[in-house]
Every structure is written in structure tokens, then in C-alpha cells.
């Protein structure tokens, strides 16, 4: 609870938002009189993320809202990942796409190929997913047979 009297509500809202608090519960004089409180979601700024709810069943409201926040953030992150993951058709395209996202491509697992990618694009292998498409492809760098697809990306 933030009961500081020396700062304004706006200062407090901002202060907690900067700390990453996902859900703010506001209780003002009007809320006390009406038996309500206001939930303010960090993931939905402005009026869209504010809801006045009855104090009765407060824990259930908070739990339900936190679940909705989690689902929203997950969906947003998944959409971002999908929008920024590319499957390059050749090496030149790999070098280009890793400048702004991830490249998912076959890799022969040779150190020389990874070193070349790093030298040409500053990207390295980031993840070798446990779930693989199966079969064999051609290494995006050298063209030799590759049994696994990996994610290449630049560190930031
Ligand atoms: Zn290779």
C-alpha cells in the first residue's frame, strides 16, 4: 500500500508503473462510499484498462484480472515473435533478416559456418529447438546436409 501523503496520486501511479507493477488497486473516498475499488492494468494504459469493481469478492476480481493480463502479455509476445521470425531462402537473405529479427534455418552444426554468420551479420545461433521438423535440409551457409534447424539472431 502506498499511503504517502507528500506526493500526488499521479506521481504514485507513475512511480509504481516504472517498477513494473502489473495491477494497481485504487481506493478513493468515492470508492469507500460506494463499496468499490478501481483496478488499473499496466498492460492496457488509459481508460481501457480501468475497471470499477465491488469490494465484495475482491480477491476473485484481482485473480481474474491478473490471469487476463498474463494471457494478454503472452499473446502479444507470441505475435511479436511470429512477426519477427523469418525463414530465409538463402544465405544473403539470412544476413539481411537478422538485422531486424530472427532467422530460422537449417545449420550443419559446423563451427566454421557459425563463425561466418557471426562475421557477416553479427548474429549467432540462439536456440536449437527440441522439436525439429525432421528429415534433412541444406545448411543455410555451406549447403551441406543439416539435420537440425536453429534460430540465428543478433544479441542486443
Ligand atoms: Zn554449414
Image (cartoon, helix red, strand yellow):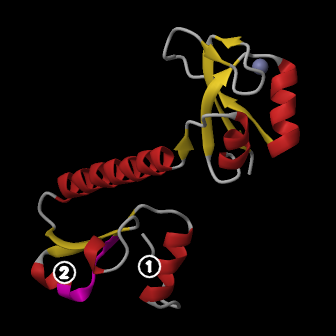
Q: Is mark 1 within 8 Å of ligand 1?
A: no
Seen at 56% across and 71% down, the residue is: 18
Q: Is residue 122 visible?
A: no
Query: CA separation, marks 2 and 1?
Result: 15 Å
Residue 116 versus residue 127: which sits nearer the camera? 116
Instruction: Decide: is 69 above or below 115.
Output: below
Residue that mark 1 sits on: 3
Q: Of the numbered discs in the image, which one, if any, rests on residue 67?
A: none
Quarter residue 35 falls in: bottom left
Relative to 66, is 9 above or below? below
Image coordinates for residue 121, horizontal then vertical, percent: 80, 44
* Within-10-Å neighbours for mark 1: few <14, some 14–19, many 20+: few
Residue 114 vs 1, above or below: the answer is above
Q: Is residue 59 in sight in this rendering?
A: yes
Q: Please state the horizontal and vertical placement of residue 111, each as a whole percent of the image.
A: 85, 20
Question: In this orientation, which residue lies closer to the viewer: 141 or 63?
Answer: 141
Q: How many marks?
A: 2
Residue 76 in the image, given as x and y percentages of width and height: 40, 53
Where is residue 37 drawn, in percent x and y?
Answer: 22, 73
The label on residue 32 is 2
Q: SS of the residue at dot 2?
A: helix
Q: Earlier in the sequence, mark 2 or mark 1?
A: 1
Q: Is residue 96 left or right of residue 72?
A: right
Q: Which residues are magenta?
A: 25-30
The residue at the point 73 percent across, 13 percent down is 144
Image-based side of 29 in relation to 140, left or right: left
Residue 6 in magenta stretch: no
Amino acid at each position: 500500500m502506498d499511503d504517502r501523503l507528500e506526493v500526488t496520486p499521479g506521481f504514485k501511479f507513475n512511480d509504481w508503473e516504472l517498477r513494473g507493477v502489473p495491477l494497481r488497486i485504487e481506493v478513493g473516498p468515492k470508492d469507500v462510499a460506494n463499496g468499490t475499488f478501481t483496478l488499473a492494468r499496466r498492460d492496457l494504459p488509459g481508460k481501457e484498462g480501468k475497471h470499477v469493481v465491488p469490494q465484495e469478492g475482491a480477491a476473485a476480481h484481482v485473480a481474474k484480472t491478473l490471469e487476463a493480463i498474463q494471457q494478454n502479455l503472452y499473446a502479444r509476445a507470441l505475435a511479436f515473435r511470429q512477426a519477427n521470425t523469418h525463414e530465409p531462402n538463402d544465405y544473403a537473405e539470412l544476413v539481411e533478416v537478422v538485422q531486424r529479427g530472427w532467422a530460422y534455418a537449417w545449420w550443419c552444426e559446423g563451427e566454421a559456418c557459425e563463425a561466418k554468420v557471426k562475421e557477416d551479420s553479427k548474429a549467432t545461433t540462439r536456440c536449437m529447438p527440441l522439436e525439429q521438423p525432421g528429415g534433412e535440409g541444406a545448411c543455410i551457409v555451406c549447403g551441406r546436409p543439416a539435420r537440425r534447424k536453429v534460430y540465428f539472431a543478433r544479441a542486443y
